[in-house]
């Protein structure tokens, strides 16, 4: 039988974001699926390079409206790893509370949408009604229902006064029984069993093969969770369980999300009970050169941020990997062999966020050859490292020849244009910077530049100690 291509998107009543699927079908059976992204690319990684460490948490909150605390949390943890920052105990509990409130509202949003997708609008209205008090709670403790602006390098931006703990507990006590009701509706309703079981099968082997994350993996019996496997915030200070399901289908992924809502309430209650008094901010003024990674278990799975610092108040490189980037690769395993009517339900079961996942490639339209692949990026990175090293050596030669010169930046004021290293090495790399050249975080008291170092693409590390008086001290 001949195959037919059915496009879904980029704009479709079922899809809340522009994404484009091409289903190759034989009759009613899907034989292949192609995923085409690109409708939401905003260049956040590149924008980050021109923002200070204090500004970037506000930027990465906009990566995803639903996961708007997991991205800043992962970023600040990467920056704190670079500086060896010890976050105050109270701030760790505050981070945990905000992260679990986010998980609650995200999972309830997904449960409602899942009910709407299959025509079960009673579940849709229930879930979204019970999500509203969670958003009201966000407004109470942060001032916003979305984009909470809580995370900063070294702690959190605002405290939750103890006099508000009672209101938080009151709302949780009201929401918890409603979540139990939703659990009963999903676990016991024969209509949901008939519609969700056996659909979108993702085996344990495919979870490992595609690197699936979050509820997508846990719904197939794989107990991975960053909160337990690599504890951060206060997750190692409270009692909770990693929820899994063994059915490996859409039903299993739905069960995991509802049961995780119960665990989130449990975590928040313990955090309120165990939170100590004390400061909420380590008052970090500067970060040294170095590299760091931050991981956070977003509602959809592990969010990963990589940050490289050159000792200035802006990152030299900021790389983001959202969980949907891994999870959408499972579509071929889940969708192929299903009917057309089940394909959209299977793809929605991973709770995809395509704005988190945007990537671009440069293609020569004449030849069709891709110009921006991994090998080209790696080669460009190595060439940039060579230019940086050459700039260092040139600066050393010039410094030796004109010892005692009075310029503020290496090579400047000596009759030649600054090298790329010199341009990157200044406190402010952009003439349109919003912050004065004070501390590398973009605020606070003045500070001398910390030791400068570059991690070479060839595996070597250049530091001030190894280069001696190569460039002098930057001011």
Image (cartoon, helix red, strand yellow):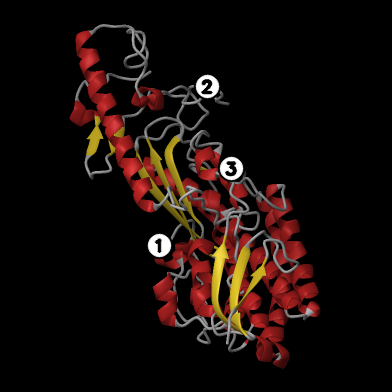
- Residue 270 falls in image quadrant: bottom right
| Residue 139 or residue 321, whichever sits in front | 321
Q: Which residue appears farthest toward the front when viewing the image?
A: 366
Q: Could you tell me residue 282's position as x and y percent? A: 47, 40
* C-alpha gap between disc 1 and disc 3: 25 Å
- The residue beneath circle 2 is 431
Q: Is residue 160 visible?
A: yes
- Residue 311 falls in image quadrant: top left
Tell me, yes or no, whether the two marked residues, 2 and 1, touch with CB atoms within 8 Å.
no
Q: Residues within 10 Å of mark 1 (few under 14, many from 20)?
A: few
The mark that comes first in sequence, 1 or 3, is 3
The mark that comes first in sequence, 2 or 3, is 3
* C-alpha gap between disc 2 and disc 1: 40 Å
Q: Nearer the viewer, mark 1 or mark 3?
A: 3
Q: Secondary structure at mark 3?
A: helix
Identify the disc placed on residue 230.
Answer: 1
State the residue at coordinates (42%, 32%): 286
| Residue 94 or residue 38, whichever sits in front | 38
Q: Quadrant of the N terminus?
A: bottom right
- The residue beneath circle 3 is 59
Q: Nearer the viewer, mark 2 or mark 3?
A: 2
- Residue 406 falls in image quadrant: top left
Q: Could you tell me residue 120's position as x and y percent? A: 77, 81
* Apparent side of residue 30 relative to residue 305 in the rendered image (left or right): right
Above or below for 369 versus 310:
below
* C-alpha gap between disc 2 and disc 3: 20 Å
């Amino acid at each position: 039988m001949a195959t037919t291509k059915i496009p879904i998107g980029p704009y479709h009543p079922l899809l809340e974001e522009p994404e484009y699927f091409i289903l190759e079908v034989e009759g009613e059976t899907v034989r292949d699926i192609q995923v085409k992204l690109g409708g939401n690319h905003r260049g956040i990684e590149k924008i980050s390079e021109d923002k200070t460490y204090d500004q970037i948490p506000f930027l990465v909150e906009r990566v995803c409206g639903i996961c708007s605390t997991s991205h800043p949390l992962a970023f600040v943890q990467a920056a704190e790893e670079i500086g060896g920052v010890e976050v105050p105990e109270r701030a760790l509990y505050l981070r945990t509370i905000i992260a679990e409130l986010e998980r609650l509202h995200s999972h309830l949003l997904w449960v409602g949408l899942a009910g709407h997708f299959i025509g079960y609008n009673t579940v849709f209205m229930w879930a979204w009604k019970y999500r509203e008090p969670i958003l009201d709670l966000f407004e109470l403790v942060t001032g916003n229902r979305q984009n909470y602006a809580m995370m900063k390098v070294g702690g959190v931006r605002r405290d939750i006064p103890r006099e508000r703990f009672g209101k938080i507990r009151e709302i949780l006590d009201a929401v918890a029984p409603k979540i139990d009701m939703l659990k009963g509706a999903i676990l016991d309703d024969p209509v949901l069993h008939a519609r969700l079981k056996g659909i979108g099968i993702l085996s344990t082997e495919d979870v490992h093969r595609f690197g699936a994350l979050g509820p997508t993996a846990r719904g197939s019996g794989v107990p991975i969770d960053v909160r337990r496997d690599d504890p951060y915030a206060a997750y190692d200070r409270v009692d909770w369980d990693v929820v899994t399901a063994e059915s490996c289908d859409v039903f299993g992924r739905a069960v995991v999300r509802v049961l995780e809502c119960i665990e989130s309430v449990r975590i928040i209650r313990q955090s309120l009970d165990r939170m100590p008094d004390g400061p909420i901010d380590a008052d970090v003024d500067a970060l040294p050169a170095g590299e760091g990674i931050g991981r956070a278990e977003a509602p959809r799975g592990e969010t990963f941020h990589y940050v490289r610092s050159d000792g200035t108040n802006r990152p030299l490189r900021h790389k983001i990997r959202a969980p949907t980037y891994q999870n959408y690769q499972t579509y071929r395993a889940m969708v192929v062999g299903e009917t057309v009517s089940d394909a959209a339900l299977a793809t929605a079961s991973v709770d995809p966020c395509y704005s988190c996942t945007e990537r671009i490639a440069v293609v020569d339209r004449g030849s069709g050859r891709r110009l921006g692949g991994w090998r080209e990026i790696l080669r460009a990175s190595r060439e940039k490292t060579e230019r940086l090293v050459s700039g260092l050596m040139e600066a050393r030669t010039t410094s030796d020849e004109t010892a005692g010169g009075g310029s503020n930046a290496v090579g400047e004021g000596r009759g030649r244009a600054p090298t790329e290293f010199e341009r990157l090495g200044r406190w402010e790399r952009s003439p349109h910077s919003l912050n004065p050249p004070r501390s590398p975080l973009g605020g606070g008291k003045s500070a001398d530049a910390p030791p400068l170092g570059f991690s070479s693409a060839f595996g070597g590390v250049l530091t001030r100690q190894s280069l001696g008086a190569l460039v002098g001290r930057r001011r």
